[in-house]
Image (cartoon, rainbow, N blue to C red):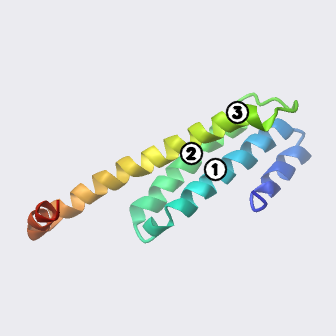
């Protein structure tokens, strides 16, 4: 979260501390997902998926009306967990889809995959 804290200060200096908190937490959640699934970093589809996830977060942070009032962590936690769950779900679906494509590209790969299961 220390790495993403400049986002909070950037928005705070623009007079939008609520948006800053949303950007800070959202970026932190994205980094957590990337860290957990870091073994996928060698695949182009991983970076493309992460690009689209970040691109989907930008309008949510910039255009949504975020409050600057104090909100306890217990109130923010479900939003962060839901955000992480959606990101992991997206990566899981894309990973599954890409693995099916990889096995269909190689004629012998499908029979090997069947014999392993």
Residue hosting label 1? 29
* Alpha carbon distance from label 1 to label 2: 6 Å
Q: How many numbered marks does the figure carry?
A: 3
Q: Locate residue 72: give its quadrant.
A: top right
Q: Residues within 10 Å of mark 1 (few under 14, many from 20)?
A: many
Closer to us: 62 or 29: 29
In this rendering, the label closer to the viewer, 1 or 3? 1
Report the residue at 56% width, 45% height from top. Answer: 84
Q: Mark 3 points at which residue?
A: 63
Image location of residue 49, percent across then percent down: 46, 53
Residue 111's place in the image compared with 28, above or below, is below
Are the residues tagged 1 and 2 within 8 Å (C-beta)? yes
Q: What element carries label 1?
A: helix
Q: How crowded is mark 2: few (under 14 residues within 10 Å), some or many (20 or more)?
A: some
The x and y percentages for residue 10 are 84, 51
At 9% from the left and 67% from the top, the residue drawn is: 107
Does residue 60 appear to the left or right of 101 in the view shown? right
Which circle's residue, 1 or 2, is located before the other in the chain?
1
Image vertical order of residue 78 relative to residue 110, above or below: above
Q: Mark 2 points at which residue?
A: 84
Q: Is residue 39 left or right of residue 25?
A: left
- Percent across and percent down for residue 106 are 14, 68
Identified at 12% across, 62% down, the residue is 110
Q: Return the residue nearer the eye: 82 or 47.
A: 82
Quadrant location of the N terminus in the rendered image: bottom right
Left or right of residue 47: residue 92: left
């Amino acid at each position: 979260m220390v790495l993403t804290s400049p986002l909070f200060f950037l928005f705070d200096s623009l007079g939008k501390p609520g948006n800053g908190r949303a950007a800070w937490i959202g970026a932190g959640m994205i980094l957590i997902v990337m860290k957990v699934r870091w073994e996928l970093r060698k695949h182009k589809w991983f970076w493309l998926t992460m690009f689209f996830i970040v691109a989907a977060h930008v309008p949510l942070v910039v255009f949504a009306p975020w409050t600057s009032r104090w909100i306890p962590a217990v109130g923010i936690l479900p939003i962060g967990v839901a955000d992480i769950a959606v990101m992991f779900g997206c990566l899981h679906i894309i990973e599954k889809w890409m693995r099916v494509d990889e096995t269909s590209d190689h004629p012998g790969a499908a029979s090997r995959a069947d014999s392993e299961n």
